[in-house]
Image (cartoon, rainbow, N blue to C red):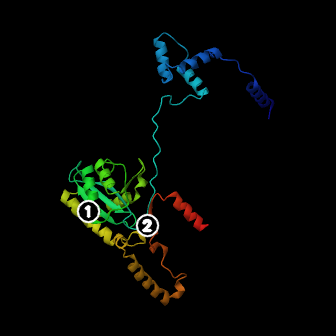
Amino acid sequence: MNRRQNAARAGRALRATAPRPAPANKLTAQEETTILATLNSERFVDQAPEQIHATLLSEGTYLCSVSSMYRLLRRAKQVAERRRQARHPARKVPELVADQPGEVFTWDITKLAGPTKGVYFDAYVMIDIYSRYIVGCQVHTRESGELARDFIAGVFAKDQVPKVVHADRGTSMTSKPVAALLADLDVLKSHSRPKVSNDNPFSEAWFKTLKYLPTFPQRFGSLVDARAFMDRFVQSYNGHHRHSGIGFHTPADVHFGMTGHVDDQRLAALQRAWDEHPERFGRRRLPKKLQMPEAAWINEPVKRLEGQEMQAG
């Protein structure tokens, strides 16, 4: 390194350590105290610096620039929303468990495109979360609390009255007619948290299954067409759809207690394979994916998880 470079480095180091002169426009300590007191006064405490600056200028007073006001507020750790804000209480996480069919039903409404743009039909669908069985499905031209109440009452009359009915926070789901019906029947009502779609996973997953069908129409020609299609699909889903969440049984088999017979048939077929080719199988038992889970839940309860961890330990 030559002398020129050494001299440059020494000059930079000297300048870095040398005290800097105070700017000519620097506010004095007394001015800063006065400005901060003005900003926090009863008159201006709920206003932004731009508003305060404009108001004072309109009255013939100049204290400092807007940027200086912000700088003083930052130093005092007061740069934030200074107005009182609405405080929304935390919503309780719905934790629901079903150990058998008929305990927890979940329902929702989905839109079906009608014959022309802007025309929609509303499909009301209720599901038993344990069996995945569609206990009710109706299609109407509109959504309302009265129609929702009649739909739910019809499901209960045809199937059974569950312990809990879960839904999101749509206007029909939280309507007075529905709330009154559930209260009269001593059914606990449960609702999703606002803007949390996975608090109603069974309905959301079923709607996706429905609308991703290759045969799902882009538009329905009429209300009659929509109802006919939904009736066919529900019958096929309940009676023939092998659901991975219930051991690849059909919802109808689970809902009506037919899984034992189906499991016996599966085990008999596997037993023949085990006997014919024992060298091909390490374990002789029904694969886990073909077994019914012990329970179904919406947001598995913390106590349940803790109990499982204790058993595993």
| Left or right: where 6 falls relative to 290 | right
Q: Is residue 188 above or below residue 235?
A: above
Residue at 32% x, 69% y is 238
Q: Residues within 10 Å of mark 2 (few under 14, many from 20)?
A: some
Q: Nearer the viewer, residue 120 or 91?
A: 91
Q: Are marks 1 and 2 in contact (CB under 8 Å)?
A: no
Q: What is the x, y in percent for residue 114?
A: 22, 53
Q: Quadrant of the C terminus?
A: bottom right
Q: Is residue 251 above or below residue 163?
A: below
Residue at 49% x, 89% y is 275
Q: What is the x, y in percent for residue 3?
A: 81, 30
Task: State the SS at label 1.
Answer: helix
Q: Is residue 22 above or below residue 167?
A: above
One can see residue 240 in this view: yes
Q: Which residue is mark 1?
A: 230
Q: Quadrant of the N terminus?
A: top right
Q: Nearer the viewer, residue 15 or 107?
A: 107
Q: Which residue is mark 2?
A: 99
Instruction: Give, as a three-letter code, the residue at label 1.
Output: Met
Residue 203 quadrant: bottom left
| Left or right: where 5 falls relative to 102 | right
In 3D space, how far apart are the residues under numbered discs 1 and 2 (Cα atoms)? Answer: 28 Å
Q: What is the x, y in percent for residue 248?
A: 41, 72
Q: Residue furthest top?
A: 60
Q: Residues within 10 Å of mark 1 (few under 14, many from 20)?
A: some
Q: Residue furthest bottom?
A: 276
